[in-house]
Amino acid sequence: MSRKLRRNRGPNEAKSSIVRAWQQGYIGVVGSKTFDGVWFMAYTKDHLPPHVHAFYAGVQMILELDFEQRIIRLADRKDRIMPRNAKKSDVKRIRRVADAYSDMLFELWEKARDEE
């Protein structure tokens, strides 16, 4: 049985799909932050729980922000890592960078909610 693999979208393609959604009014993007090559975004019209989207080397991850414990963890949803066959080294890098800059990611989410 053959298995279909999703095409690994590059960072420019991911950015262009975000820009299209913003132009159509589906999301409001409040800036973005790039740390050590990883691009993080929070959207003004995004749903709870608090989270950020991270992009690196064609990988997109959704990271939940736990304000009570001040920790960042992988979101509990099916599309938390795309593509699903992403390289483990890329996933680990995104996690390391998110942990290193966690205070700034919490601020990014708060700024997005203030702009809503």
Image: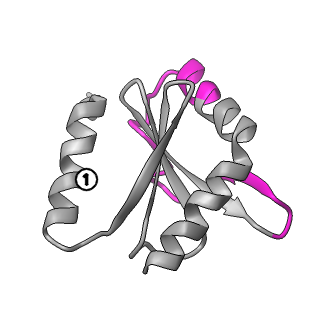
Q: Residues within 10 Å of mark 1 (few under 14, many from 20)?
A: some
Residue 34's x, y, as percent?
A: 49, 36
Q: In which quarter of the view is residue 25 placed?
A: bottom left
For numbered disc 1, what is the local secondary structure? helix
**Residue at x 76%, y 67% (from the top left corner):** 67
Q: Is residue 107 above or below residue 90?
A: below
Q: Name the side, left or right, on which 13 lies relative to 103.
A: left
Determine whether, in the image, residue 78 is placed left or right of residue 8.
right
Q: Quadrant of residue 85?
A: top left
Residue at point 81% right, 59% down?
Answer: 70
Instruction: Give the residue pinned by disc 1.
Output: 18
Against 38, residue 49 (above or below) is: below
Residue 4 visible, this orientation: no
Task: Name the residue: 45% across, 76% down.
Answer: 115
50 or 90, nearer to the observer: 50
The quadrant of the rendering that contains the C terminus is bottom left
Q: Quadrant of the N terminus?
A: top left
Residue 54: x %, y % from top left: 49, 43
Magenta stretch: includes residue 47 = no
Residue type (three-letter) at the residue carrying disc 1: Ile
User: Does residue 90 belong to the magenta stretch?
Assistant: yes
Q: How many marks?
A: 1
* Residue shown at the point (60%, 72%) measured from the top left: 49
Magenta residues? 68-93
Indicate the position of residue 48 as horizontal and vertical percent values. Answer: 55, 76
